[in-house]
Image: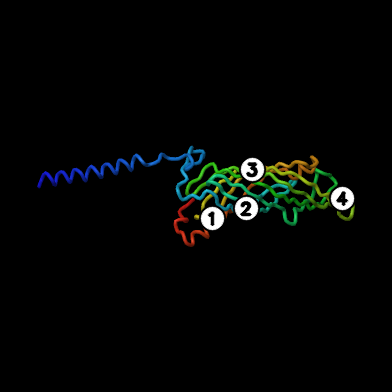
Amino acid sequence: MITRTLFIALLLVGVQSSAQLHGLMSQKAPNYNDTVWTIKGKQALGPSVKTVKLDFALDARQTLISSERTRLAGIRLGLEIRRVHRIGLGIYGLGDGVELEELPEIDSTINKANLKLAYQSIYYERVLHFSRKWEWSATCHFGRGKVTGSFERIGLTGSNVLQEQKLNVLELSTTGYYNINYWLSSGIGLGYRFMYGLPKEIGDVYEAPVALIRVRIKLGKLVKSIWDKDTQNLY
């Protein structure tokens, strides 16, 4: 009886050990597709990260038009791919324009001017670092737009229309984000806007550094969290 009991116990232990060994051997090594490159090296995405999701941001910029500081408002909509790649379209403009009391880049006799800028761009943003609360990225915008406006000269009455000019825009910037919660992030950054296709004197008016203020709204996560509470833990 003792021998039979011992034999059965040893058999059960052997079966269990064999199953555990098989489980260890069958585990797959980490796949490169499950990681992305950041400044820390390869960083795991985790099984719950969606391959593609919506990227939506309100994108305001403080910038200079001639020597006047003004705000360039914008909105962007695109896709986020594998957590670190964002690509899409942006729309930007000065609204009613910026009022200037001089415009020496074009003519020293101008004592009043209203200038407008509007452009549409394709953007690519690469996330360089991310964690639960912080993120750092670099962005490139390339687009097409136009500048318009009007001006007045010293000693002359009436306004003159500044001929509409088509332009190409290249903007390079870097932004740091803070995740307020799982669906809302705020960010600040710095960059520079280059203008192409304009006469030099007009290009000098619009080409300038930019300070970014960005609010990212993760609409997809907000909606999905209604029925999937685990979404709130993804950053």
Question: Residue 39 placed where, x, y %?
Answer: 51, 38
Q: Which mark is residue 154?
A: 4
Looking at the rendered structure, the secondary structure element under dot 2 is strand
- At mark 3, the secondary structure is strand
x, y percent for residue 26: 36, 41
Q: For mark 2, what is the residue?
A: 77
- Residue furthest right as drawn: 156
The answer to whether 54 appears left or right of 167 in the picture is: left
Foreground: disc 3 or disc 2: 2
Q: Amino acid at mark 1?
A: Leu
**Residue sitting at x 47%, y 49%:** 132
Q: Comparing marks 4 and 1, which lies closer to the viewer?
A: 1
Above/below status of 217 relative to 195: below
Which residue position is annotated with label 3? 140
In this figure, which residue is indicated by the disc labeled 1? 184
Q: Amino acid at mark 2?
A: Leu
Query: Distance between the Cα atoms at labels 1 and 3?
Result: 22 Å
